[in-house]
C-alpha cells in the first residue's frame, strides 16, 4: 500500500504523516470471559406482520435539505468508513482512484483525520508486513486515540486473520488478534463503536471484543451481530445486513438476546423473503430504534435487466422497554419507473436531539424527529451526484457527518469520483 499524497482542494490540508517505521507485529490476546448464560428476554410485538403493498406507516415528506457540503477533494478517490469523536475530530478511511488506458483502478489511501479545517493522512502499518490487509471498521475517542479493525492476508485464504490497528502516542501500530476473536473480528461486516468512558466495543458474527481502557476482553454473543449502537449507558447490537434477524443488549453479566418479531409466512407469490435488521440507534434506556426492512422476489416478474423483480418495505422497529412496534415504509422495487434503486434502510445514527438519521438511498437520507419522518437530499456540485457511504454522530452535540464521494461523468460515460464530506447541525462545543 503506497502512501496517500497531500491534498490541496477546497480547503487547506493540515499536512501528511508518513507511516511509522514498521516493527514485528505482536498478537492481541483478549482476556477470555466465559459464555454468558443469560436467558433471552421475551418481547411482545405490535404491527409486525407482513405489511400490505400500499402500507406506509412512516409517511415521510420531502424537506429542504438540512445537509451542507463541507469539503470535496480535488483529486480522484472516495472515503468509506467514518468515526466522529467528541472533540470534533473525524477519522475516515480513504481510497485513491485513477484511470489508465480505459481501465479504472483504486487503491487504499490510508486513514485521514479531520481537524475542522483540513485532513492529515497516515498509514496503518501492515500487521503482516509481507501480505496485504483490508480495513472493515473504525472508531475514535479523540484526535489522539483511534482504532481500525481489519483482516490481514496470509499465505492462503485459510491464514487470513483479524487485526486491530491502534493510534496512540501520535503513531499507528497493528496487532494480530488471537482466536477465537481473529476468526471474525476484523473481517467484512465488523462493527466497532466508542461507547463512552474510554470503552470501545467491536462485534462480528458470534464474537465481541471490549476495550476497557486497559485491555481487550473477549465476550461471546448469543447470536450473530454486525451493527452496534449506544446511548444513555446502554449498548445494543443487531444482526446487521448479512445475518438472520437478532437484537441483543449488553448487561453487567454479559449479552442478553432480546426476542425480535418473527418473519411471517409470506403469500404464495412471494419467493425468498428476507428480513434485515441493519442498524440500531439507542436514544434512551426504553427508546431504541432498529432500522432495516423486508424484501422478496416476485414469481414471474422481472426488472429492466431481466433479473427477478425484488420488492420490499423499509422497517423502523421501536423498543419501549417491554415490546417492539413495527413501522413500515412504503413499498419499493428494483423496477422503479424513475430508474432509482430500491429504498433500503442501512446505516443509522442519532441526531443528538432525540431523533435519528438513516441512509435510504446513497443520496437521500431519512430523518426522524418528534415522531415525524422527512427525506433530505444530499447536495452535490452541478453535474454530479452524491453517494454517502457512512454516517457518524459527534457525541454531545447536534452534529452528524457523512462521507462518501461525488460522482460525475467522464469520457465514454465513465464515472469520476471525488471524496466528499457533509454535515448537518451547526458546529458546536460538546455539551
Image (cartoon, rainbow, N blue to C red):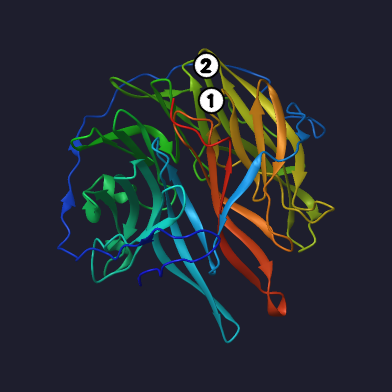
Which quarter of the figure has residue 84? Answer: top left
**Quadrant housing the C terminus:** top left
The percent coordinates of residue 339 (x first, y second) are: 79, 56
Side of 142 where 387 appears, left or right: right
- Label 2: few (<14), some or many (≥20) within 10 Å? some
The picture places residue 116, in percent across and down from the top left corner, at 46, 47
Which numbered disc, 2 or 1, marks the residue that appears first in the sequence? 2
Identified at 71% across, 48% down, the residue is 342
- Residue at the far top in the pictured view: 322
The answer to which of 326 and 9 lies nearer the viewer is 9
Kind of element beneath mark 1? loop
* Vertical relation: 73 (above or below) 337: below
Residue 203, percent across and down?
A: 37, 40
Q: Image point 72% across, 38% down: which residue?
A: 375
For the point 27% across and 45% down, the residue is 181
Q: Is residue 26 above or below residue 409?
A: above
| Left or right position of 254 against 359 | left
Q: Looking at the figure, which quarter contains the N terminus?
A: bottom left
Res. 267 in view: no
Indicate the position of residue 366 as horizontal and vertical percent values.
Answer: 67, 37
| Residue at numbered disc 1 | 260
Are dots 2 and 1 in contact, CB under 8 Å? yes
Residue 43 numbered tag = 2
What SS does tag 2 mark?
A: loop
Other-residue count near label 1 (Cα within 10 Å), few / some / many at <14 / 14–19 / ≥20? many
Identify whether 336 is placed above or below 140: below
Instruction: Looking at this view, name the residue that lies furthest to the right.
Output: 337
Label 2 – label 1 distance at C-alpha = 7 Å
Does residue 170 appear in the picture of this structure? yes
Q: Residue at x 55, y 37 (%)?
A: 348
Amino acid at each position: 500500500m503506497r502512501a496517500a499524497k497531500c491534498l490541496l482542494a477546497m480547503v487547506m490540508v493540515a499536512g501528511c504523516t508518513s507511516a511509522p517505521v514498521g516493527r514485528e507485529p505482536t498478537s492481541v490476546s483478549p482476556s477470555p470471559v466465559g459464555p454468558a448464560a443469560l436467558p433471552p428476554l421475551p418481547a411482545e410485538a405490535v404491527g409486525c406482520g407482513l405489511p400490505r403493498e400500499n402500507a406506509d406507516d412512516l409517511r415521510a415528506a420531502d424537506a429542504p435539505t438540512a445537509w451542507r457540503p463541507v469539503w470535496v477533494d480535488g483529486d480522484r478517490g472516495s472515503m468509506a468508513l467514518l468515526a466522529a469523536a467528541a472533540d470534533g475530530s473525524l477519522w475516515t478511511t480513504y481510497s485513491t482512484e485513477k484511470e489508465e488506458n480505459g481501465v479504472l483502478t483504486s487503491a487504499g489511501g490510508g486513514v485521514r483525520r479531520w481537524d475542522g479545517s483540513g485532513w492529515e493522512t497516515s498509514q496503518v502499518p501492515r500487521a503482516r508486513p509481507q501480505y496485504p490487509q483490508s480495513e472493515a471498521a473504525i472508531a475514535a475517542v479523540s484526535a489522539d486515540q483511534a482504532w481500525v479493525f481489519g483482516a490481514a492476508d496470509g499465505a492462503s485464504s485459510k491464514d487470513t486473520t483479524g487485526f486491530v490497528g491502534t493510534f496512540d502516542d501520535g503513531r499507528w501500530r497493528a496487532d494480530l488478534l488471537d482466536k477465537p476473536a481473529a476468526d471474525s473480528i476484523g473481517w467484512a461486516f465488523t462493527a466497532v463503536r466508542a461507547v463512552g468512558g474510554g470503552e470501545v466495543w467491536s462485534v462480528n458474527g458470534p464474537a465481541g471484543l471490549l476495550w476497557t481502557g486497559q485491555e481487550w476482553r473477549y465476550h461471546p454473543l448469543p447470536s450473530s451481530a454486525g451493527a452496534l449502537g449506544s446511548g444513555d449507558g446502554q449498548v445494543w447490537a443487531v444482526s446487521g445486513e448479512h445475518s438472520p434477524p437478532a437484537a441483543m443488549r449488553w448487561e453487567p453479566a454479559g449479552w442478553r438476546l432480546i426476542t425480535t418479531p418473527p418473519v411471517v409466512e409470506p403469500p404464495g407469490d412471494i419467493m425468498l423473503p428476507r428480513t434485515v435488521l441493519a442498524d440500531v440507534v439507542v436514544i434512551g434506556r426504553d427508546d431504541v430504534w432498529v432500522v432495516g426492512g423486508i424484501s422478496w422476489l416476485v414469481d414471474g416478474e422481472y426488472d429492466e435487466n431481466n433479473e427477478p423483480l425484488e420488492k420490499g418495505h423499509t422497517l423502523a422497529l421501536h423498543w419501549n422497554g417491554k415490546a417492539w412496534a413495527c413501522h413500515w415504509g412504503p413499498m419499493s422495487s428494483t423496477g422503479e419507473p424513475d430508474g432509482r434503486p430500491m429504498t433500503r434502510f442501512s446505516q443509522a445514527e442519532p441526531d443528538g436531539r432525540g431523533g435519528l438519521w438513516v441512509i435510504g438511498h446513497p443520496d437521500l437520507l431519512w430523518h426522524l424527529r418528534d415522531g415525524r419522518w422527512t427525506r433530505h437530499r444530499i447536495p452535490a456540485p452541478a453535474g454530479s451526484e452524491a453517494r454517502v457511504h457512512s454516517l457518524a454522530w459527534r457525541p454531545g452535540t447536534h452534529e452528524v457527518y457523512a462521507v462518501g464521494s461525488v460522482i460525475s461523468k467522464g469520457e465514454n460515460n465513465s464515472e469520476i469520483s471525488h471524496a466528499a464530506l457533509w454535515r448537518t447541525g451547526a458546529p458546536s462545543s460538546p455539551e
